[in-house]
Amino acid sequence: MLSINLRHLEEAELALRGELPVAELDLGLADELIRVEKPLRYDLKAELLHEAVLVTGSLVLPLECECSRCLKKFPTRLHLKDWAVHLPLAGEDKVSVDNDCVDLTPFVREDILLNFPQHPLCKTECAGLTKPENDRKDEVAESAAANVWVELDKLKLK
Ligand SMILES: [Zn+2]
């Protein structure tokens, strides 16, 4: 469980570093093109503000994707570099505190889902399953370039 102990936080800032298992992150994914098999890695700092906790840091979730165009499988990761969450300890929106602890998991889950890739692509210019016109042009260009080298070699030999 990814949680913050408020008693400890009253004494000093807390550094939270570790991994959250997929089962605990519990994303409830229906998308078959993206699978989450490895734990979420977090590197966070928690500090106590006036009647609130501010948590900042980075979240990294490795993903196993299937390209939505060409169906190739490829690994990628979801990286929230400057993740931040503000947790009020008083007022209407105050977070629930259980045994002096605030569970961060629901906040992490929400932002991971918000930033989840919608249509995974193995590369931005992925053309899909059929071979497009562009590829053939590239091949022609490449062989033209190769010919240039051959010509240069001939020049050198002279
Ligand atoms: Zn692709």
Image (cartoon, rainbow, N blue to C red):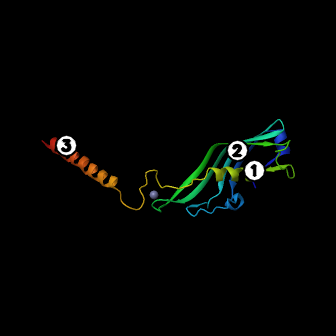
Of residue 43 and residue 158, the one placed in the foreground of this image is 43
Position of residue 52 measured from the top left corner of the image (x, y, whole percent): 81, 40
Query: Contact, CB < 8 Å: mark 2 with mark 1?
Result: yes
Query: Contact, CB < 8 Å: mark 3 with mark 1?
Result: no
Cα distance in 3D space between marks 2 and 1: 11 Å
Of residue 30 and residue 138, the one placed in the foreground of this image is 30
Q: Which residue is mark 3?
A: 152
Kind of residue at badge 2? Leu
Position of residue 124 measured from the top left corner of the image (x, y, whole percent): 46, 50
Kind of residue at badge 3? Leu
Secondary structure type for disc 3: helix
Kind of residue at badge 1? Leu
Q: Which residue is mark 2?
A: 44
Q: Which residue is mark 1?
A: 104
Left or right: where does residue 114 sit relative to residue 1?
A: left
Q: Earlier in the sequence, mark 3 or mark 1?
A: 1
Secondary structure type for disc 2: strand
The N terminus: image quadrant: bottom right
Q: Residues within 10 Å of mark 3 (few under 14, many from 20)?
A: few
Task: Determine the image quadrant of residue 50.
Answer: top right
Left or right: where does residue 136 sit relative to residue 24?
A: left
Residue 100, relative to residue 73: is it above or below? above
Q: Earlier in the sequence, mark 2 or mark 1?
A: 2
Farthest-out residue, left = 158
Cα distance in 3D space between marks 3 and 2: 57 Å
Labels 3, 1: front one: 1
Q: Residues within 10 Å of mark 1 (few under 14, many from 20)?
A: some
